[in-house]
Image: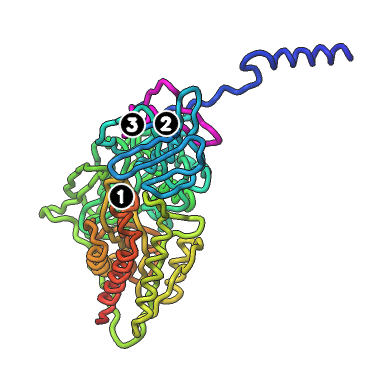
Amino acid sequence: MKKFFTLMLLMSFALMLLPGVGQAAPIVPKLYFNGKAVQSEAQPRIVNQFTLVPLRLVAEQLGYDVKWDMKTKQVAINNSDTEILLTVNDSRALVNGSNTKLDAPALADKGTTYVPLRFVGENLGLDVYWDKPTRSVHLFGNMPTGTPAGSDGSPVVPPASGPAAPVDSMPVTNPNEPVSDAAPPVAEPAEPPVESELPGDVLAIVKGFSFDGLGRVTVDYDGQLTPNSPFWSGTKLVIDIPNAALSAELSAELKAQGRSQGEMIVETLALQKVRYSYYSDKPSTVRIVLDLAMTTEYALSDLDGRYNIDVIMSDGAAATPVPGVPAVPVGNGVYKVVIDAGHGGKDPGAPSVTGHWEKQFNLSIALKVQKLLEQEQRIKPYLTRSSDVFIELDDRAKFANNLNADLFVSIHANRYTSNATGTETYYTRPDSKAFAAIMHKNLVKSTGLPDRKVRQASFLVIRKTTMPAVLLEAGYLSNSGDAKALFTESVQNKIAAGIVAGIKEQLGIS
């Protein structure tokens, strides 16, 4: 027996000396940009759960302006809006001059410099998705217009606090099945994922849905959208989008509600609601269904990541909204107005290219609005949060409903590509449309940013509140000009004053 154990020990030792025995092969992730494979001599790698890519790939394959300083071991990456400075083995980086902490620093190995892909991609306006089954990273966004000017480089973005739990793929569903009223179709972002999962055959990510209040349904997306020809099923207009997936935010929202499809209530004379779900997984296909009161003419257009479906009545007019009675209080009473600072606490909202977070902007504006409203004798303001705390979306709506508030205003800032700019205002129910128009007019004037119009979308906080309610998107934190303005004190004061002016106009207070 003793000889047997001695023999086994010797065999184990011999196996340990063999190259590769007992060691797992390193994971080499595949990289795709807008659905096309990205090739590089040096392969990407995964280090401490973060994907790192060769700097040369960022310059030559993705087309960014990259400069490498061998002496200081620093990398500078530029596009039209953002300048990033990384130093090898340094856990901090500079983004447009702002100091930012990295979850995974750049590293150098055998003459190749590697940089954290998500940090690079998101800071340059790209969306990054991780496909676990195929070990693939998908990047979606616009190719930079500049010419690469170096062989190595790297970028930076305010990272999330750590790797997020994977988001499961949604099951295949029948679009004609009954749908409850619980799930919003446009997800209000929660804590941002580090790398979101999606099927391996995906070329486009469906990010959200909106309605302009007349007849246009807009599908926001990243990547290459190739819808099939629409077809009618009774009075339902059906559009299938192969090689597409719902964004992590939309999928997480549906999963949290325990539902397989989402919907956006529209309530016009022709168009009643818009539904969306996964229809097939071979290939991954998103189905969009427009529930109409009758068959109508329609027009399709696709421009800059927005796929538009225009419902046209037989006389050529867009679908007319059902008349709503805007709540314009009268009398000499005191009005209750709820100001909702979006996100907060563990939910930071959208990252800004300035190094800030959306939750900081939202709270700053809410506090300024509160201070101004407290000077009005006939208005009593209430805040859903007055500090950096996390409040559930349902609790925000319940707070306003329990108060029997007269108005509800939710304050946010947007994020998309670095080129997106401007101010948007959202409402859900027809009785909020007039209020949205008033608020938007005053908000655009105060921000000084491009007018991106009043839109209809089913954000939970403005859908579940029972009083006239709006959600304000003051500007785009992914745009350097918008972000700089939104975090300037004088501009914030103007925005707060504009919000107050809109509230007073709605209430008929001079």
Residue corresponding to mark 3: 62
Q: Nearer the viewer, mark 2 or mark 1?
A: 1
Q: How far is mark 2 from mark 1, CA to CA?
A: 30 Å
Which of the two residues, 54 or 315, is positioned nearer the viewer here? 54
**Callout 3: few (<14), some (14-19), or many (20+) C-alpha neighbours within 10 Å?**
some
- Residue 277 drawn at (x, y percent): 38, 44
Instruction: Look at the image and say whether residue 136 sits in the magenta stretch.
Output: no
Residue furthest bottom in the image = 332
- Residue 329 drawn at (x, y percent): 30, 80
Q: Residue at x 27, y 46 (%)?
A: 419
Count of residue discs: 3
Tell me where the magenta segment starts and ends, as one range.
Answer: 38-65
| Residue type marked 2 | Gly
Q: Is residue 174 visible?
A: no
Residue corresponding to mark 1: 479
Instruction: Look at the image and say whether residue 57 sits in the magenta stretch.
Output: yes
| Residue type marked 3 | Leu
Q: Residue at x 35, y 76 (%)?
A: 372
Q: Is residue 203 above or below residue 414?
A: above
Which of the two residues, 425 or 377, is positioned nearer the viewer here? 377
Among numbered discs 3 and 1, the one appearing first in the sequence = 3
| Residue type marked 1 | Asn
Q: Determine whether the residue tagged by mark 3 lies in a helix, strand or loop.
A: loop
- Residue 262 drawn at (x, y percent): 39, 50
Q: Residue at x 22, y 65 (%)?
A: 445
**Callout 1: few (<14), some (14-19), or many (20+) C-alpha neighbours within 10 Å?**
many
Q: Determine whether the residue tagged by mark 2 lies in a helix, strand or loop.
A: loop
Among numbered discs 2 and 1, the one appearing first in the sequence = 2
- Residue 87 drawn at (x, y percent): 46, 37
Residue corresponding to mark 2: 200
